[in-house]
Image: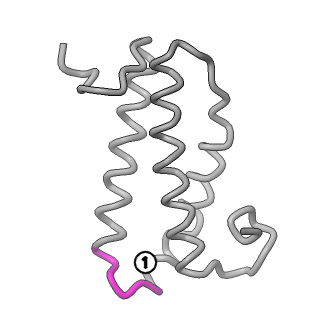
Amino acid sequence: MSDIDGNGADTPSPASLESAMTEVETMILNARRVLAGGELLDMTPLGERVSWICANVRTMVLTSSDPDSIRLRLEKMVSDLNRLEDEIRAGLGAVDGDAREE
């Protein structure tokens, strides 16, 4: 998907935006698993995908037939990213349960 990397069309398609969101969701889950195992992880690719989504979210919402579902998905993604940050800062890297409940 060259348009996800910024090398394709000027206006990303809704499908490429949906694909990028799915990729970020998967990257968050994988990061939590790796960190739970005590391993180090390069978070650069995750940051790049999130930046790309942020830069293109307006197009996504304007071209979507269901902008509310996109909003809800983005809200969950932000929550998941915040939780991942909390786990990294706490040094827990827990996959199950909420790291904030101690």
Image spot of residue 86 (x, y percent): 38, 24
Question: Is 101 displayed left or right of 12 in the figure?
Answer: left
Placement of 7 over or under 90, stated as above or below: below
- Front residue of 33/12: it is 33
Question: Is 78 displayed left or right of 6 in the figure?
Answer: left
Image spot of residue 90 (x, y percent): 39, 13
Quadrant in the rendering for residue 32? top left
Q: At 32% across and 51% down in the image, what residue appears?
A: 76
Q: At 45% across and 19% down in the image, what residue appears?
A: 36
In magenta, the rendered stretch is 63-68
- Front residue of 93/10: it is 93
Question: Is 41 displayed left or right of 102 in the figure?
Answer: right
- Residue located beneath label 1 in the image: 61
Total label count?
A: 1
Image spot of residue 19 (x, y percent): 55, 66
Placement of 24 over or under 92, stated as above or below: below
Q: At 62% across and 59% down in the image, what residue appears?
A: 52
Q: Residue furthest left?
A: 101
Residue 30 shown in magenta: no
Q: Does dot 1 land on a helix, a strand or a loop?
A: helix
Placement of 17 over or under 20, stated as above or below: below
Q: Residue flagged by tag 1: what amino acid is it?
A: Val
Residue 65 shown in magenta: yes
Q: At 55% across and 55% down in the image, what residue appears?
A: 23
